[in-house]
Image: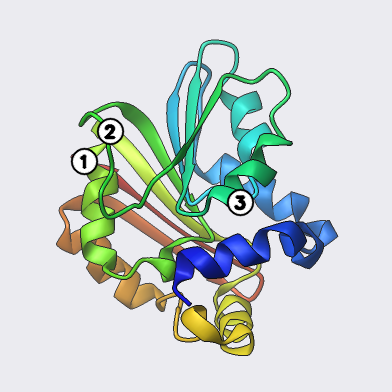
Amino acid sequence: MDRREFFDLSAPEWNRRTPEDLLPQLNRVVAEARLRAGDYVLDVGTGTGVLIPLIAEAIAPQGRLLAFDISLRMLLEARRRIHGETVLLVQTDAHHLPIRPGSFDRVVCNAALPHFGDRRRALQELIGTLRVGGSIVISHPIGREAVNARHREAGGPVAEDRVPPPEDMEILLRGIGLADTVVIDEPEFYLARARKT
């Protein structure tokens, strides 16, 4: 079983595994992303779309949101969260994005980074979609250690998918040419933010 199959099989039960009290952390992710009305935003690995309503509200009324995931079944679950927002859902892989360079003001990668087989390549693809001055946010609202423990317990294709410690994340982001890097590593919240120069 590969990651796509794992997430396809997990999709129907996914929201039941998500802590119900996660809304404050999700709101914090959106706040840390510094979204503005009118922004064009790429939601990376949207899964069941937990951030879609929050992002859509932050960028309304003229903003645009493209949310993608490798799993079609996750996207079908995400469609249920869309209530009139201007959101486009696309099934694709972060390593090979069919997106015109410089299309977005912000990239939000929530709870997805550990699942990229080649993180550097995937991040370069994501950064390529940003306009100069745009920023990327990489987040894990339950915290680094909790994510890593969940993946170990889940086993299968995600067993070794890990959130990197802050120093490794900074090296990775700076290594692909990003600036103004900030990494927050709290017990119940993890977020990295950087800007394209």
Residue picked out by circle 2: 99
Give yes or no for contact between labels 1 and 2 (Cβ–Cβ under 8 Å). Answer: yes
Instruction: Relative to 50, say whether 184 is above or below.
Output: below
Q: Disc 1 or disc 2, which is closer to the eye?
A: 2
The residue that appears at 67% across and 50% down in the rendered structure is: 26
Q: Disc 2 or disc 3, which is closer to the eye?
A: 3
Q: The disc labelled 2 sits on which kind of residue?
A: Ile
Dividing the picture into quadrants, the one containing residue 187 is: bottom right
**Residue 119 at x, y percent in the picture:** 29, 66
The residue that appears at 36% across and 66% down in the rendered structure is: 116
Inter-mark Cα distance, 2 to 3: 22 Å
**Residue 122 at x, y percent in the picture:** 27, 57
Q: Earlier in the sequence, mark 2 or mark 3?
A: 3
Dividing the picture into quadrants, the one containing residue 115 is: bottom left
Badge 1 element: helix
Residue picked out by circle 1: 128
Q: The disc labelled 3 sits on which kind of residue?
A: Arg
Badge 3 element: helix
Q: The disc labelled 1 sits on which kind of residue?
A: Gly
Res 50 seen here: no
Quarter of the picture holding the C terminus? top left
Residue picked out by circle 3: 73
Scheme by which the image is coloured: rainbow
Q: Is residue 125 left or right of residue 193?
A: left
